[in-house]
Image (cartoon, rainbow, N blue to C red):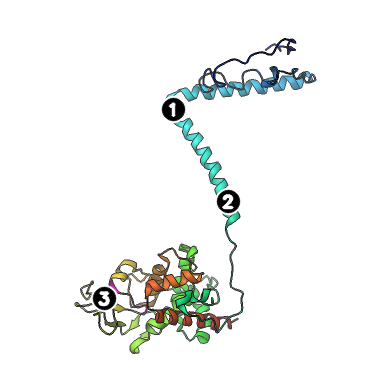
Amino acid sequence: MPVVPRQRPPSSPLVTPPSGPILGGRSILSGRSILSGRSLLSAPSILHGPAVPPPPAMPAGVARHRRRAGALLVSGGRAVVRWGHRPSGRFVLPLLVIAALLAATGAAGNYAVRATAPTPHPSTAAPSPSASADPGDGLGGVAPTEGNDVATDPATGAGLPAHPQDVVAGWATKLAPATGIPPVALKAYGYATLRLSADKPECHLAWTTLAAIGKVESDHGREGGAQLQPDGTALPPIIGAPLDGKDGRALILDTDGGRFDQDRAYDRAIGPMQFIPRTWVQYQIDADQDGQADPNNINDAALAAATYLCAGGLDLATSAGWQGAIETYNQPQTYLKNIFDAANDYGVRSRSVA
């Protein structure tokens, strides 16, 4: 293509700009590529001053390569435009544009989230045995003392454990003497906490909260002379008083036909974590993978309780979030204070274990 030398504009009166829209003419998708026309810098200045002087001449080899690159770019642009007019191009091209926009905005959003997300805050404060506060005042702005982090046992190469909860057997065995909690119950609480930290990390549920509920509700499956078996089942089954509206109890007519609580007149709380039958039906889970979800098995009951506590979207690392979650389990303020004190006590005791 011959090179047209740049022309210096004559010293004439200001040229009146052409009327009409600045983008008037054919669409950039239907006409020539915007890269195939003359450079904007080759026209007179928009302020109608002297033209930009031409750049120094380049060596012939460089100019030839640049002309080839420009020709390839123009040719490729025209090919894209022609493809865009075809049926497949009219369908695919907008999708490609949308995908590019989504990728750009997604990358920016990911960067923003990473930049603004708070860093993890493991509890390093000294335990406070007197951290208990009046729960009616938002627990004094504090949550129970956190316990030692749940730790899984190192892999032994001996295959999978008999129950999923056995992955924290070493941790539970070490903490049991200091906390007074049976190892089988500690395994259930620890495993349930690990599951929720993976499924709903924003909940920040601590094992000490589950342990406190297990303590207050059934003394970790030992209510009324019951004992936890090695597989986590409480025998004999733990069944509460009828919810008949008497002596301060709620009134809840039978909802399970006596299937879980052996009462066809009223519902009764069942198992180590004392679920009401209709709530158990909603949150039941086979945590130990023995083929059945059993409210009298502390493995199943602990994971169901953990799921229930985190279902409301609250952050249990905060005082208000922790209190709100416990109140969904049971509302009396005396109950809330008992759970708080037990959870705080377990947190303090566990900190004494190296």
Is label 3 in a helix, a strand or a loop?
loop
* Residue located beneath label 2 in the image: 112
Residue 338 on image: x %, y %: 43, 82
Crowd around label 3: few <14 · some 14–19 · many ≥20 (10 Å): many
Counting other residues with Cα less than 10 Å from the Cα at mark 2, is it few (<14), some (14-19), or many (20 or more)? few
What is the magenta segment's predominant secondary structure?
loop
Looking at marks 3 and 1 on the same chain, the residue that comes earlier in the sequence is marked by 1
Q: Which residue is at a point 35% across and 86% down the rendered structure image?
A: 223
Q: State the image coordinates of residue 64 (x, y, percent, origin top left).
A: 72, 19
Kindly state the secondary structure of the residue where label 2 is placed.
helix
* Pointer 3 or 2: first along the chain: 2
Residue tagged by mark 1?
88
Closest to the observer, 272 or 243: 243
229 displayed left or right of 83: left
* Residue 264: assigned label: none
Please give the range of residues in magenta: 272-277
The residue where tag 3 is placed is: 260
x, y (%) of residue 78?
55, 21
Q: Would residue 77 appear left or right of 162 to someone viewing this image?
A: right
Which is more foreground, mark 3 or mark 2?
Answer: 2
